[in-house]
Amino acid sequence: MATEPPRATRGLLAVAGATMGDIATAAFALCAVSGALLIPAYDAHDGRASIAQWLLTDAGAVYLRNVHYWTAQVVVIATLLHLVDHLRLGSERRLTGGVWLRVVLSLPILGFLMLSGFTLRGDADAEQAQRVVTGVLNQLPVLGPLLATFLFGTGDRLHVVYAQHASVATIIVWLVIVEHARRLWPRATAVAGYALLCGIGLFLRSDQWRWQPDWPNGPGDLRPGWILSSAALAPTARHAKVPVVMGHAEGCLVCHAGVTGLGVSHQPEAIGCASCHGGNVHSLDARRAHAGMIRVPGNLADASRTCGQAACHVTIIPRIERSIMTTFAGVI
């Protein structure tokens, strides 16, 4: 993605001597490498459980996932800016028709890479996105249903979309980059610059985005090790097995196990903590885990978001909200 315009006309979208194509190529290389390192720890049978395991027990995997995510965003943005640069400078005329056609056709494949990466999360939002896309594809005549099956497979398993994301689509985009940029690997300066930014973000950023040059040592941060330590994210969770509630990992119970005084139906082992209180079940850092938490879920002001969830008392809450004891209608 980096056929260079002359230096005199490189212009507005060049950064430190590198074109947007150089930046996109470097970001794609880092994205591919970080994704490849995550492959052994991802189970396509249950993508949601795999990612929950990373978030709760493996700080190294969390770091690699963050690199993978943010470099993917940079690839898309820098690619679009590089396309604008080509059109602005008229340099696309130097490309052969075949190369230009393959570059243009690679853009929807790049879009599929982003979408398939999102669906591999395996959560409710990812499932809904996949249903919407496959529903649209199935409406296309003749080839639509075949394309939907080819890209996403059938059923709830993620094996097909996982294979397309990790191999087929990635290889196609990489081959187009190699052909267009006329180099097998990105510029070392671009990769080094991007790696430097990652290092700054890892080692120099403290709480509240204050800059503090120190090794990150808070809960959930990387620990020194042979490469990246996979030690537990909090002392209370060291080598602990991630609790599973209603088929999903719930980090709340690592710290809040053994709660008593609740009925059988409301015991944390049965419905977890977040079902009523909210919060972030995929973090063992107290500040992150308790963000947005509802301390007293039974209060009527919050009952529709807690007790009134679809799997709980969805029909009772509206009745209570309209009852005489709540509204005092006809009493006063």
Image (tube, rainbow, N blue to C red):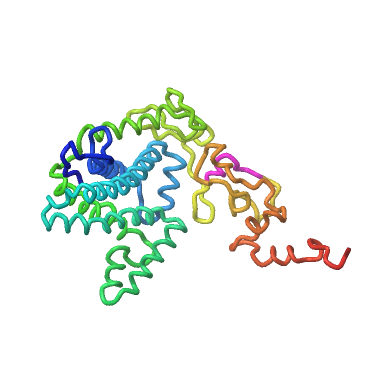
Q: From this viewpoint, which residue is outermost toward the bottom?
A: 142
Quarter of the image for residue 185 reads: top left
Q: Is residue 36 magenta?
A: no
How many numbered badges does the structure rendering display? 0
**Where residue 30 sits: x, y (%)?**
28, 40
Looking at the image, can residue 283 be seen? yes
**Where residue 26 sits: x, y (%)?**
25, 40
**Image quadrant in which the C terminus is located:** bottom right
Quarter of the image for residue 31 reads: top left
Residue 41 drawn above or below residue 172: above
Task: Compare residues 185 and 286 and report the one nearer the observer.
Answer: 185
Q: From this viewpoint, which residue is outermost toward the right?
A: 332
**Where residue 42 sits: x, y (%)?**
35, 49
Residue at 40% in and 49% down: 50
**Where residue 20 sits: x, y (%)?**
26, 42
Task: Compare residues 249 and 162 and report the one nearer the observer.
Answer: 162
Q: Which residues are magenta?
A: 251-259
Q: Is residue 256 magenta?
A: yes
Residue 186 drawn above or below residue 162: above
Left or right placement of residue 71 versus residue 11 in this view: right
Looking at the image, can residue 26 be seen? no
Left or right placement of residue 25 versus residue 72 in this view: left
Residue 139 drawn above or below residue 29: below
Left or right placement of residue 41 versus residue 265 in this view: left
Left or right placement of residue 327 versus residue 314 in this view: right
Task: Compare residues 197 and 145 and report the one nearer the observer.
Answer: 197
Task: Compare residues 203 and 235 and report the one nearer the observer.
Answer: 203
